Image (cartoon, rainbow, N blue to C red):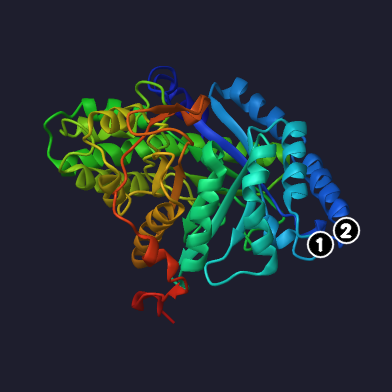
Amino acid sequence: MINSSEILSTLEMIERQHLDVRTVTMGISLRDCTRRSPEHTARNIRDKICRTAADLVRVGEDIEREFGIPIVNKRVAVTPIAEVAAACETDDYVIFAKALDEAAHEVGVNFIGGFSALVQKGFTSADENLIRAIPEALDVTERVCSSVNVASTRAGINMDAVRRMGEVVKACGNNAAKLVVFANAVEDNPFMAGAFHGAGEGECVINVGVSGPGVVKTALEQCKGAPFDEVAEVIKKTAFRVTRVGQLVAREASKRLNVPFGIVDLSLAPTPAVGDSVADILEEMGLERVGTHGTTAALALLNDAVKKGGVMASGHVGGLSGAFIPVSEDAGMIRGAECGSLTLEKLEAMTCVCSVGLDMIAVPGDTSAATIAAIIADEAAIGVINNKTTAVRLIAPPGMTLGDRIDFGGLLGSAPIMNVNKYSSDLFIARGGRIPAPLNSLKN
């Protein structure tokens, strides 16, 4: 059991070190909403979300007040819409995105995820319809997030899907900040923009994502010059304390909403606020600037220690769980990108050992769809070969070039336009087909 003394012990972490619960996310199954009529299906989607999540925001705010724990976002994730809409007599899926957005506004959540398709092995007609609708859907809605899984360790990489998603990212412009392209997507991720309620999940569930880069950074300040095994121990103990806070919030929200508790995702999710940066943690280990030689090793230590500490604090750790490295959402990453120590190639190397992938990165607006697709393919290959989740959230703002900076606002922050390799990948992407699953997928 978690008692009040444990919560009181986190007071300094909350007040001075930017500890927060980043999100309480309610996963909702929409499988029973399907009808032949798209209008009827959209109405069912809206009604079920509004009915099921009616008290989510109020309960989150009550827990914030009673325990003094900031809960930054309250969110909803739903069954991938490509699955829900498959039986509908329409090929225009924007109607379902609008239904999701209306429901999100009515219940008051910050974002709603699940305008999604899983195409790691091939496309259904519903998947085709959803992918085609993504640019318009994200343009006409405010709170809807979209994701597409193009690869898995068991299936390999669907290069036709990779090519399509390069075109979609390009077509979305600035709205691509709400679109994630995955390999090995997980079904219980509470973080946006990639959250959806997977096929293996129940009717409804509460998942919580915690944060706390500032807490880890402060803890490491007390062991300057210590060997790395001691550094790892400090991070593990800190991650344990942070995860206990998430465990408390998850169980309280579950009880008050009468919804099963799913998982705690113990990812270190940064914000643009000073003192809330994963890059600052890496630099505290002795790197002059994030991106220099040694960065990947430092990140590997951090990610592993966070998982080891967190898994002891909760019986249900899931989601992505580790360290996020979004450029626009991390003041230290922005600093590294602007001074040239952090490049796209170095970020790709770092994704081999962290939670997700190339996240919230802005590239020149004239970057071709094929180049974007090739970046997605590289990241998918890392996920497939290493049997881990990887993702790409890349933005190519129209008209912007190297040296410019785009402001997304709020937690999404701002990003300098980063350089991409000038040589073409067009013929590589044009091949299509599927890159076969690796040998390590044969586990049966």
Residue type, numbered disc 1: Cys
Question: Residue 430: horizontal and vertical position, in percent?
Answer: 44, 67
Of 16 and 153, which appears nearest the observer?
153
In the picture of the structure, the residue carrying the numbered disc 2 is 37
Q: Is residue 299 left or right of residue 194?
A: left
**On screen, 202 above or below 27?**
below
Question: Residue 185: horizontal and vertical position, in percent?
Answer: 50, 58
Of 262 and 285, which appears nearest the observer?
285
- Residue that appears at 44% across and 44% down: 394
Residue type, numbered disc 2: Ser
Residue 123 lies in quadrant = bottom right
Task: Answer whether labels 1 and 2 touch (C-beta < 8 Å).
Answer: yes
* Disc 1/disc 2 C-alpha distance (Å): 6 Å
In the picture of the structure, the residue carrying the numbered disc 1 is 88
Q: Is residue 122 left or right of residue 43?
A: left
Question: Residue 28: horizontal and vertical position, in percent?
Answer: 70, 50
- 10 Å crowding of disc 2: few (<14), some (14-19), many (20+): some
- Nearer the N terminus, badge 1 or badge 2? 2
